[in-house]
Amino acid sequence: MTDNQGARHAGWKFDNSYARLPAFFYSRLDPTPVRSPQLAVLNVPLAASLGLDAQALRSEEGAAVLAGNRLPEGAEPLAQAYAGHQFGHFTMLGDGRALLLGEQITPSGERFDIQLKGAGVTPYSRQGDGRAALGPMLREYIISEAMHALGIPTTRSLAVVATGEPVYRETALPGAVLARVASSHVRVGTFQYAAAWGAPEALKQLADYTLRRHYPEADEDGNRYLALLRGAIRRQAELVAKWQLVGFVHGVMNTDNMALSGETIDYGPCAFIDAYDPETVFSSIDVHGRYAYGRQPYIAAWNLARFAETLLPLLDDDRNRAVELAEEELAAFGEWFRRHWLAGMRAKLGLSNEEPEDEHLAEELLGLMKEHKADYTNTFRALTRGKPEETALHGTEAFARWLERWRARASRQPEAETVSRQRMLGHNPAVIPRNHRVEEALDAAVNRGDYRVMERLLAALSRPYAHTPEQEEYTAPPEPSERPYRTFCGT
């Protein structure tokens, strides 16, 4: 198969609904070509699920498409406009280095955005170079795929292509383009942009589009736009609960990074906690801890309030009544979050039925973990393995008393202990993308061109609940010399 044949037969099947919205929402432009595109990593299973041929994507022509040097048939590249509260401050934003190629229709009829991140300068670049460095793009690939394997709604990574060109940050770094896959890239910030600078009709068009794409069931509701708000609140409550349950710290929960699809988006300064502490912050720019691990539910509620504000003109003609309707829905976020978090925590503790003291039992364990700086993932892993002596809590009277209460609570379940253990195995990962192992993989790939370390890590992360002997080497927490860990946005 020649390269040109590879392009024709890769399986692209675009139907670009976002491009049919008014031009107010985007700017049409082509990606900026790169010097020498070379495929660094390709997500073969994801390509297959999208209806794409991996062999064609691996060809020279395929790499050129994934880098933005050539456009696949049916692509309508555009940079999306949006606004957002960044660390609490409202500003005009937009895709400063990303272009939406179009929407791929899969063999099963699903619709996914195909976006190239690092594709060049756009009208929204805000004096940036529109490019991305190889390390941060590989990092997003690793962590987004780990999140998918953990069962957490997320954007995904189809491929990373090295560009053969340097990008300049503090130093010169090798450049790359990430091909990102998402249910859509409509954000809270997209609605903020429409509300702040668009005509009333533009806001309604965006809301109708989002309802069609992500909340078609709302058509059966008496107030479709209130149903949109309700649906977004419930999806975000469930999403952030899942983050908390695995110790994920997003790091930059600006409103432009809250997707209306309910997926995790933007893997800039994110990381997973090792020693449990709700005040954990990894991002070098989050100096006041606004987006600390323990604050994520509150920030999600704050972001949703900003979303609700944009919808007020659609909720009711009477603004006071619209505010009342929005506040009623927003007030439910805490209970929805608590419900999902507590259900997940019961599962992590092997509990199937519900008792009033379950929340206190979980909170007490977390308190002990904080006091003794216990590793979050490994504490639950040790309990799952029936080896509490492997935790940092072992030997303390408080933990001994907690174990006694937990075992007594577990004994009041209507099922065998083996069933409870299986539940724990399915909700307590053996491995997460630990920061020091991610850095090890990136160092090998970026600085030595050795992708084998990354491949082994990805293999271990692809089945986080398998608890196999092969995963053992990835369960160790970092050495003291590898702490504290700091992340950077990569822009």
Image (cartoon, rainbow, N blue to C red):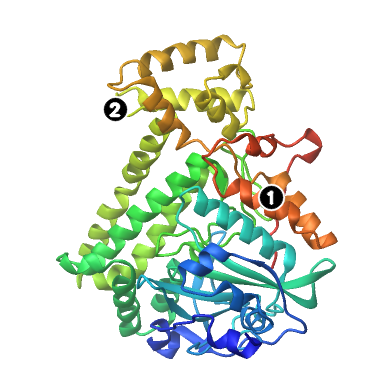
Residue drawn at (68%, 78%) of the image:
130
Q: To which residue does mark 1 refer? A: 456
Q: Secondary structure at mark 1?
A: helix
Label 2 packing within 10 angstroms: few (<14), some (14-19), many (20+): few
Q: Is residue 400 above or below residue 245?
A: above
Q: Which mark is residue 32?
A: none
Residue drawn at (70%, 76%) of the image:
131
Q: Is residue 443 left or right of residue 64?
A: right
How far from the left and from the top, in percent, is residue 122? 62, 84
Residue drawn at (73%, 67%) of the image:
134
- Give the distance between the C-alpha atoms of the residues marked 2 and 1, in whole angstroms: 40 Å
Q: What kind of residue is marked 2?
A: Glu
Q: Is residue 329 left or right of residue 82?
A: left
Q: To which residue does mark 2 refer? A: 354
Residue drawn at (51%, 44%) of the image:
295
Give the quarter of the figure containing the N terminus.
Answer: bottom right
Label 1 packing within 10 angstroms: few (<14), some (14-19), many (20+): some
Q: Is residue 89 visible?
A: no
How many callouts does the rendering have?
2
Is 121 or 1 nearer to us in this picture?
A: 1
How far from the left and from the top, in percent, is residue 483? 75, 39
Q: Is residue 43 left or right of residue 22?
A: right
Residue 377 figure quarter: top right
